[in-house]
Image (cartoon, rainbow, N blue to C red):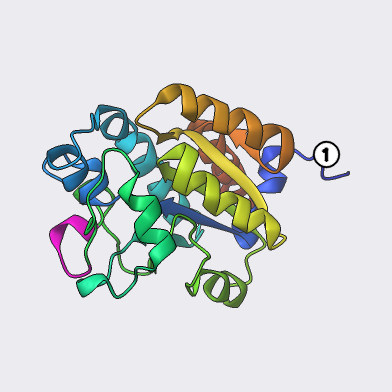
Amino acid sequence: MTATDAPLSARVRPSTTALLLVDFCNDFVDPAGKTAVVGGRDVSHAQRVLPAAARLAAAARRAAVPVIHVLHTTLPGGASDSPAWRDARSRAAFSAPDICRLGTWGQQAVAALAPEPGDHVVHKYRYGGFTGTNLELVLRSLGRQTVVCCGVSTNVCVDTTVREAFARDFFVTIAADACASWDMDLHAAALATAAKRFAVVADVDDIRAAWNQTDHAQSGGTV
């Protein structure tokens, strides 16, 4: 069977897959975070996908799929900034210069997706989860060749992370209904582009079913 016609269960085998939860930080998702309070962004789209992302994370843990929280981070005193980054961020709507500052509540994962024992946490300092981080090292050390990604915002940090994963020769699946953007038209456009060029786009329940199917087969058909 070629990769083109491989079923989802073959693409996201628990033994070779990791789940990336991208930027489910309080500052981005919680109504009390800086995106909403300082940037004035409506975070309702992000709020709505939290239950789906939580179901996916729970299914990953049951299937022994590593869960990796990839959390945006700003170092105190602007130590993680560069002139190009500051320039881009100064033109970014719905944000704040010190969003997700290390050591603050805003940088932590939202309660619904808090890291559990056995999870991994990677701090990222740019839009993509691989730039200047140990994410690839963690994935390679865990023997993973496939990533399932979800998070916010679909068209920026999720999109950049999955493009970086693909460029490093990881197979990529995006959990569409566990992703959100401040502009859901941009969300849809990012997913459409990904599906045509570098990722498989699937629903959370389909990914969970694929993991459950694998568990069922490995247990000899018992529940």
Give the image quarter of residue 29: top left
Q: Nearer the viewer, residue 59 or 133?
A: 133
Residue 63 position in % (x across, y down): 50, 54
Is 89 on the left-hand or right-hand side of 16?
left
Is 198 on the left-hand or right-hand side of 219?
right
Q: Which residue is mark 1?
A: 4
Which range of residues does the magenta coloring cover? 102-108
Residue 214 position in % (x across, y down): 62, 48
Residue 210 position in % (x across, y down): 60, 40
Q: Residue at x 61, y 44 (%)?
A: 173
Residue 28 located within the stretch drawn in magenta: no
Q: Nearer the viewer, residue 109 or 98?
A: 98
Give the image quarter of residue 72: bottom left
Residue 223 makes an appearance in the image: no
* Residue placed furthest toward the top: 185
Q: Nearer the viewer, residue 13 or 180?
A: 180
Above or below: residue 93 compared with residue 62 = above
Residue 96 makes an appearance in the image: yes
Give the amino acid type for the residue marked by disc 1 in the picture.
Thr
Q: Residue at x 44, y 59 (%)?
A: 67
Above or below: residue 3 compared with residue 184 = below
Q: Residue at x 21, y 59 (%)?
A: 98
Q: Residues within 10 Å of mark 1 (few under 14, many from 20)?
A: few
Q: Quadrant of the N terminus?
A: top right
Above or below: residue 74 compared with residue 24 = below
Residue 171 position in % (x across, y down): 69, 53
Figure disc tally: 1
Instruction: Give SS at disc 1.
Output: loop
Give the image quarter of residue 55: top left
Is 154 on the left-hand or right-hand side of 137?
left
Is 20 on the left-hand or right-hand side of 81?
right
